[in-house]
Image: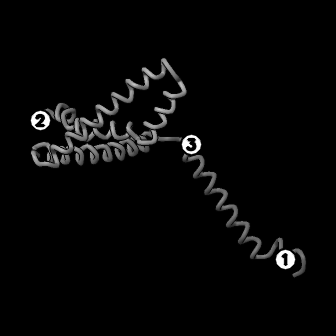
Amino acid sequence: MGFWSVITGAKAIDTTTKIAEKTTDGIISGLDKIFYTKEEQAETLTRRLEIADKIATTHIKLMEATASETTTRSITRRIVAIFVMILTFISMFSMGLVWKLDKEWALFMLELVKHFQIGVAFISVIFFFFGNYLIGKFTKK
């Protein structure tokens, strides 16, 4: 048995075979991932369109559920939307004026706006409150 049995024994051959199989599988898998076939592109596009359709459908259902509301909640939502819009425009206008006078103070104001995430609130209002009119135009309702 001795020293050469480590190299030529059944266990060594079995281990070598497993390593060769793993290496071959890795090479084949890597070569397959290099080429992005038309079928894979179509599958990816289909998945993306399905996700976009689910998002649009959910948004349309939300807009249909809340469009006819005249409750206090609906009125409050309108007031919040108007407040966020006014706050955003005042922030932009004041930062523009202050920028001419003191750039350091304008940068401080910009950090405040970022800290309170007024931009996120603005986009949310545009999307959820005013978005139903845009979706209504595209769906021709």
Q: Is 128 placed left or right of 11 in the picture?
A: left
- Up-down: is 22 above or below 106? below
Secondary structure beneath disc 2? Answer: loop
Q: Quadrant of the N terminus?
A: bottom right
Residue 34 is marked as 3
Disc 1 to disc 2, C-alpha distance: 81 Å
Figure colour scheme = one colour
Of the two numbered discs 2 and 3 on the same chain, state the one appearing first in sequence.
3
Marker disc for residue 141: 2
Under tag 3, what secondary structure? helix
Three-letter residue code for mark 3: Ile
The crowding category of the residue bearing disc 1, from other C-alpha atoms within 10 Å (few below 14, some 14 to 19, many at least 20), is few
* Residue 21 shown left or right of residue 16 in the figure: left
Residue 125 lies, in percent from the top left, at: 28, 39
Q: Amino acid at mark 2?
A: Lys
Evaluate if marks 1 and 2 touch, with contact meaning CB atoms under 8 Å apart.
no
Tell me which residue sits at (32%, 47%) in the image: 51
Residue 43 left/right relative to 13: left
Q: Tell me which label, 1 or 3, sits earlier in the chain.
A: 1
Residue sitting at x 17%, y 35%: 136
Q: Label 3 neighbourhood size at 10 Å, few (<14), some (14-19), many (20+)?
A: few
Return the residue at label 1.
Answer: 5
**How many numbered discs sit on the rendered protein?**
3
Q: Position of residue 113 (x, y in %)?
A: 43, 36
- Towards the viewer: 79 or 41: 79
User: Left or right: where does residue 108 sit relative to residue 85?
Assistant: right
Q: Could you tell me which quadrant the C terminus lies in? A: top left
Quadrant assignment, res 5? bottom right
User: Residue drawn at (38%, 30%), measured in percent from left and top?
Assistant: 91
Kindly give the residue lying farthest to the top in the view shown.
100
Front one among 4 and 45: 45
